[in-house]
Amino acid sequence: MELTTPIPGRKLGPYPLNEGGIAALLARYEFGDSCLRRVVLDQEYGARAARGRAVRLVIDARVVSDGLRWEPVCLDLVDVQRFRIDESVGFSWVLYEAPLFTRFDGLLQVDLCAERFDGPRPASSGEVFEGSELVFAAAGGTWSALHPWSK
């Protein structure tokens, strides 16, 4: 049963969410007033050799070098150890700032509510998760530019 529009295929990428890859992501996109369109959580239950949780976040953001044209971009997180998704007050999640990427305890923290850090960066994983409504801790991940949404 298909209830939603399929997620578009990759146009560019995937690129690792390491220091260089994150810098390229933040240079390519303007995230102010962007919209989180889709969260896909994939977790196997009962498997002997479970691969861990995977999360795909699809965000509509503006391409800085192309007249601020809207483009879907996805963050694919692997081996997600912890996450928090609170209900959105409106119809969708609006990002007011670029995601905040940090590393604590060997995990990549991706905080999509980074506007609350108006000053020093968080000093621990606990600080990242405390007060955030949309945050993930994963072993790693990639980002990709996607083709436009089908109409």
Image: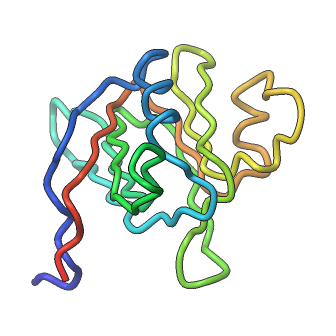
Drawn side of residue 118 relative to residue 112, left or right: right
- Image check: 88 left or right of 24? right
Res 52 → quadrant: top left
Can you say whether 4 is above or below 21 in the image? below
Along the line of sight, which residue is nearer the eye, 14 or 57?
Answer: 14
Location of the C terminus by quadrant is bottom left
**Residue 101 percent across, percent down from the top left:** 58, 31
Q: Is residue 83 left or right of residue 42?
A: right
Residue 119 occupies quadrant:
top right
Residue 36 drawn at (x, y percent): 47, 64
Compared across the picture, whether 100 is left or right of 21 comes to right
Where 115 falls versus 95 (above or below)? above
Q: Nearer the viewer, residue 148 or 36?
A: 148
Picture quadrant of residue 80: top left
Q: Residue at x 20, y 46 (%)?
A: 46
- State whether residue 10 is above or below residue 22: below
Residue in the picture at 59% in, 47% down: 135
